[in-house]
Image (cartoon, rainbow, N blue to C red):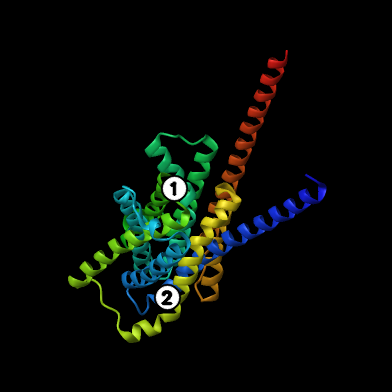
Amino acid sequence: MGRGDWEWREKHLQKNVFFGAFLCFIAAASWGAMFPVAHSAFKHIDPFYFTIIRYGAVTLLLVLILFWKEGKDAFRFEGKGVRLWFFGTMAFAVYNLLIFWGEDLLGEQGIMVASIMESLMPMISIVIVWLLFQKRPPLFTSICVILSFIGAALVITKGDVRTFFHGTEQIIPSFFILIAVIGWVVYTLGSREFKEWSPLRYSTLSCLLGTATALIIVIGATRFGYVPVPTTDVLIQTGPHLLFMIVFPGLIALLGWNVGVSILSPINALLFINFTPITTLLISTFQGYSVTAFDLVGTALIIVALIANNIYVRLQMNTTSNRRIKALKFRERMSQS
């Protein structure tokens, strides 16, 4: 291969990396903007119907894209229907319904709490893997996890520890949000069981089944009088909010993140999660939300913990890689002697 070919490949790789970084940034920023936009919409519409309308549209778009890209055979469950339904329910029923319900119950404070919980996903996944698969994290990672949870606690309680014991108005909705985030982490971990499927296929079929479950829940809640059906005027008022939520945090972020991860690798892509609470803070400040010192300190603690653990994992991977290279070289020398 000539020098010109190598230069072309290097430039092509750089373009792919920039494109992957752009996609991950757009996804993280969209998720950060999602909570202030949703809070504004909840002044007019119930969060349950807001979720169903949003992901009903996203599901339809994903189905059309999957049919166009992979054909009708991609809609076969291949004996994995029950698992697909479970993981889809975790993401598109448990996560979508509970995170916005919790945000709505908390009021204005819920914007930051939901965003902070969202940014905790990498740390929560470490804890879940530890509990389910007995893979204990290294000491440094454990310290980063504790640090990130302290940051989240600062944002939720605003520095008042008594909130954990008496502030049920804050703790119960925050618990809903935590359960929602755990649901999404379980969904993400579940993608390992569908490695032979494309990210688009897994996203579409799980979204289809999970949103169907959410629809049944909302219909039941409506029938028993817990959830009001939005009127035409309400839908017109929240139309711009729904359009944004469908296009950016829904479709573009979901597909863009998957493509970005495939280009950059998960460890590089996770760094962009830091833009989620930063975007939320910027938009909330612009909307008039009074950001407290505890919001800033808590967000900073989580970002520092995420970056520190990311650097630590990189160093561990490099050390392991170097050891393997040395071992291979040693074996080669031994075989030649």
Please name the residue shown 63% across and 28% down the image.
324
Q: Quadrant of residue 72?
A: bottom left
Instruction: Evaluate whether residue 244 shows in this view.
Output: yes
* Secondary structure of the residue carrying numbered label 1: helix
Residue 231, placed above or below residue 107: below
For disc 2, the neighbor class at 10 Å (few under 14, some 14 to 19, many from 20) is many
Residue 100 in the image: x percent, y percent?
A: 37, 66
Give the residue type at disc 2: Leu
Q: Which residue is mark 1?
A: 124
- The Cα–Cα distance between marks 1 and 2, rounded to whole angstroms, is 29 Å
Q: Could you tell me if the residues under marks 1 and 2 are in contact, i.e. CB atoms within 8 Å?
A: no
Q: Is residue 96 left or right of residue 4?
A: left
| Furthest residue toward right | 3
For disc 1, the neighbor class at 10 Å (few under 14, some 14 to 19, many from 20) is many
Instruction: Evaluate whether residue 167 shows in this view.
Output: no
Between 324 and 124, which is closer to the camera in this rendering?
324
* Secondary structure of the residue carrying numbered label 2: helix
| Furthest residue toward bottom | 233
Q: Which residue is mark 2?
A: 242
Between 209 and 163, which is closer to the camera in this rendering?
209
Dot placed on the residue nearer the N-terminal end, 1 or 2: 1
Q: Quadrant of residue 235?
A: bottom left
Residue 25 in the image: x percent, y percent?
A: 58, 61
Between 218 and 291, which is closer to the camera in this rendering?
218
| Furthest residue toward top | 337
Depth check, mark 1 against mark 2: the one in front is 2
Residue 196 in the image: x percent, y percent?
A: 45, 46
Give the residue type at disc 1: Ile
Q: Is residue 256 left or right of residue 38?
A: right
Residue 67, placed above or below residue 241: above
Q: Quadrant of residue 99?
A: bottom left
Residue 3 in the image: x percent, y percent?
A: 82, 47
